[in-house]
Structure formats: C-alpha cells, structure tokens
Amino acid sequence: MNLFDVIGPIMIGPSSSHTAGAVRLGRLARELLGEPVVAADIGLHGSFARTGKGHGTDRALIAGLMGWQTDDARIPHAFEHASHAGLTFHFEMVCLGDSAHPNTVVFALKGQSEGVLRITGCSVGGGRIKITEINGFPLELTGDFAALVTLHQDRPGVIHSVTGILAARAVNIAEMRVSRRKRGSTAVMVIDVDGAVPDEVVSEVAVLPQILAVRRLNPVVE
Amino acid sequence: MEKLSLSAWLDEANASTLSFGRFCLQTQALELELTEIELSERMKQTLSVMQQAIAYGLTGVRSTGGLVGGVGLQLQQYSTGDQAARSLLGPLAAKAAAYALAANEANAAMGKICAAPTAGSSGVLPGVLFAIAEDRGINQDDLSVALLVAGAIGMVIASRASLSGAEGGCQAECGSAAAMAAGAVVDLLGGSPDQVGHAAALALKNLLGLVCDPVAGLVEVPCVKRNAGAAIIALLAADMALAGIKSVIPIDEVIDAMATVGRAMNADLRETGLGGLAATPTGLECAERIFGAKNHPLE
Ligand code: SF4
C-alpha cells in the first residue's frame, strides 16, 4: 500500500469494487484472450448479479473488455461503443454457490480465432481483483504485475526452458505458479515479473515444442 | 502490512521543525521515488479531478440507481446569494457541505472521481479543501501539500485498521475521510504537527461506530449525505484543534479503537446492505423498486 492507494485511484464511480474492479477484470480477461473480443457471454454471481446494474458493473466489464482504463469517461456509454466496435455481449445471472466470492464474474470470450476462452474472476475490494480460473485451470492472477502465462504440455523441463528464456533476457521473476489437471496432460503456468515482458521472450517461448499458447499480460492495477 | 504510527511521524516532523505537510512531502517523495515537484504535480492533477467532480455534481446529476441527485446544488442555492444569511452553518461550512454532496453525487452518477480514501467517501476531502481554498484564497501548491497530509493519515489508518466499509463499517470510510480532511486543514492553516494529530483524532472519535448500511447495496443512500456530515465534523475538529483543544485519547489509539469496533460489527452492518438503513421498510422498498422483487438483497 502506498499514498496513491489512499489518495486514489482516479476512477469512474460509484464503487471501487463494483465499477473500477469490474473494469480491471474485463481488461485482464481481454489480455488473456490476446485479441479483440468479438463475442462475450458474461455470468454475474452474488453481489455483482444483485447490485451490478446500479453500480454500472455491466458497463464497466464491457469497458474493460475493450481495453479501457478505470478512469475512462466513456465508461457510462460503454454499451454504445461496444456495438460500434463489433463486440456483442450477453449478460446472465449465475449462482456459483456460497463458496464463490460475492463479486464473481464468469466470462466466455470469443475473438476472431477459433475457440472460446472461459475465465472466472472476482473483485476483492478497493478495486483489487483476482482471476481464479482459466478454461478450468485454477490459478491466481491479480494484475499487479506484468506476467507471462503459458498453456503447455506437462513434461519435464518446460518450466526450466521458459525461465531460462526470461533469465537470458534479464527479466526478474517476482512470483510463479503452475497448475495442472492431471499428471502428464496440459498445465498452465503464470509468471509474474518485475518490469515488462520483452517481445523476444514471447516469441521465443511460443516456439518451444511443448507450448500450446502463450500470453503476455500488462498490469491492470495502474 | 507494517503498522504505521501517526504519532511517530508527527514527532519526527516536530523534531525537524518542519510543518507536517512539508515533512510528508519530503518523506513520501523519497518513499515513492519521485521528486518533490513530481509528487506535488501528481497531487495537483488529483485536485483537478476533485474540482471537476464538484462541478459535475453541481450540475444536478442523478445517480445510476436513481436514489440521489441534485442535493449539492440545492444546498448551494439555499446557502448563497440574497438569502445566504439563513444558512445556520454560515457560508464556509455550508459551502463545504454543498461541495461534499456534489462531489459524491458525481460519484453516484458514474462521474470521474478520486477515491480518497474510497469512492463512497470521495466527497469529504474535495468539499472541505475547496471550500477553504476559495474562502481563504489558498493556492494549488499549498492544497497539494494538504492532500499529502490527508494521505499520510489515511495510510496510518489503513495499516492499523481499515479504509473499507466492508471490513470496518462507514467509520472506516467517512470516518477516515473526516480524520484525513481535519488533519489536512489544520496543516493548511498553519497548525503544528501535534494539532494535526489532535484534529484527526477528534474527527475520527466523532464518527466512531458508524455502520455501513447502503440501501439496495448501492453507494447512494446514506453515502452522499454522510459525506456532508463528515465534512462538517472535519471542520469542527480542525477548529477545536486550532483552538488548542486536545483529544484525550491519542490518534493511534483512536485508530486502534476503530479497528476493534469494526471487528465487533455484525456483517449486516458492513456493506452487505442487509442491516441498518438498508433494512428499514423504505430502504427495502427502494431496493425492490430498483432491482425488482426477485432480486431482493435479502433473498
Ligand atoms: S455507508 Fe458504506 S458504502 Fe456508503 S459511504 Fe459509508 S462505508 Fe461507503
């Protein structure tokens, strides 16, 4: 926590969790998709479902999916902008049970390329967020750091190869997490780094044989 | 999070014979790895967002949920012009209250604001600071230093207690905002570091125990009008401190008490929209009107 967390953030109201946090969740989801969102099915759970409309949570999520910042004055009109940008969306209320955080959103996103990306995330208070699941893989992403995310085959040496590439480019790892569904199948790795992830790292990681997909994430907590 | 101590900072400022604002400028610039000029520029940008929020609110905007809107303008019209004398508060305090209402109405209407310390309590600092700045002809440089004082007080509260209604009730939001504003004003008007601490303590004590009970779970009722109340308490606390009145309980201990009180609060009274004003017949009726009976917060 620093001074700018107390005198700030500068944001579109009314709520840091239901508005600013929602923008950040949308933006991180868009970064994970790695291309402009063409279609979004969005499920709202708990307080997001109950009070989201009055907080502009729906518009904030769409603003985030278009890559906007939390202080973008266009947020109240995000729906109109989305239709111009060729983004179709649909909201529904979902019930994820008592164990889910009360401010949870579930995205099913489509870009130009094949396939649907499913992302679950929640707004944990004060504008801070957490992505908790991607395509069924549990993981934790807060958007505080620049990050490298990989989907890869769960084989010995993959992690070593990726961290080797980061080391060769003098990128310092702040934290890393790996999650897999069962041994030897596919796994997801999140590497938070200090500073930014250089282009070369992304292209070098992408051509490693076991890598199925790689994404570079920019921090969404300004 | 490391526990900070406002008293320790105030003592350091005293020992270095700096005003608390100057002390904050020096120490925070170091901490954030910025020059003092860069930090002060950032604060000025923030002030300009605050000022625009007041102006937007004074256009009479209505909130997204439709429960609030136009009251900042209403109080301003009542307390200025030909009949200004009828305002019981007098021009300065009435202006602070009107501005606080307006800035928080801007928040409720999806306007651009600075969460200071939170979006729900984002009217208090703009209200107090700009009313005084206009009344006393204070420039942006001095105001930006005052904002740093507010920030330092808020950081101590965040580290020892909380700034979130969901964790500590509204005492943590509007109470903290009042403490931050009171300390900022005292520094702005030339008070000593000790007086800054007493002002913050006196303000927070007056809002201790305040619950968070937003109607329909929205940042509208009672939030907007509480911003006005917190602004007035901040002015009162600043006046008392500048008059030499002391808080018997020192600021750090008041903050610790706030943390204890927050923990003792039932979850219904911590932003869930299930207790207090939210659970009154009218509060429930508002919720039903906005969300329909099916999505009632109580279900
Ligand atoms: S009542 Fe709750 S939501 Fe409203 S300002 Fe106070 S703490 Fe924030």
Image (spheres, rainbow, N blue to C red):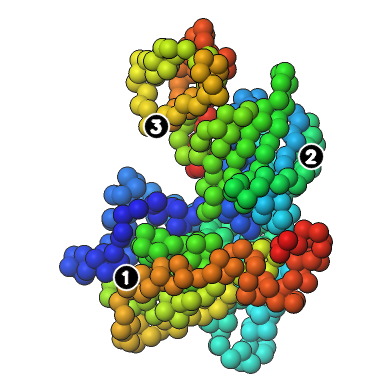
Q: What residue sits 57% from the left and 29% below the top? A: A137
Residue B121 can be seen in this image = no
Circle 1 Cα neighbour tier, 10 Å, few/some/many (<14 / 14–19 / ≥20): many
Task: Identify the residue position indicated by label 2 in the image.
Answer: A90
In the figure, B138 relative to B28: above or below? below
Q: What residue sits 71% from the left and 21% below the top? A: A115
Judging from the image, what secondary structure is the residue with disc 1 in? helix
The answer for how far apart the CA atoms under marks 2 and 1 are is: 49 Å
Task: Identify the residue position indicated by label 3 in the image.
Answer: A175
Answer with left or right where residue B64 lies relative to residue B187: right
Residue A50 rendering spot, x and y as whole percentages: 72, 56
Is circle 2 on the same chain as circle 1? no
Circle 3 Cα neighbour tier, 10 Å, few/some/many (<14 / 14–19 / ≥20): few
Q: State the image quarter where residue B286 is shown.
A: bottom right
Q: Quadrant of the C terminus of chain B?
A: bottom right
The answer for how far apart the CA atoms under marks 2 and 3 are is: 35 Å
The CB of the residue at mark 1 lies under 8 Å from ligand 1 = no
Q: What residue sits 28% from the left and 56% below the top? A: B26
The answer for which chain carries disc 1 is: B
- Of residues A107 and A136, the one nearer the viewer is A136
**Amino acid at circle 2:** His
Q: What residue sits 29% from the left and 49% below the top? A: B30
The answer for which chain carries disc 2 is: A
Judging from the image, what secondary structure is the residue with disc 2 in? strand
Residue A195 rendering spot, x and y as whole percentages: 40, 31
Answer with left or right where residue B145 lies relative to residue B223: left
The answer for which chain carries disc 3 is: A
Task: Identify the residue position indicated by label 1 in the image.
Answer: B252
- Of residues A210 and A143, the one nearer the viewer is A210
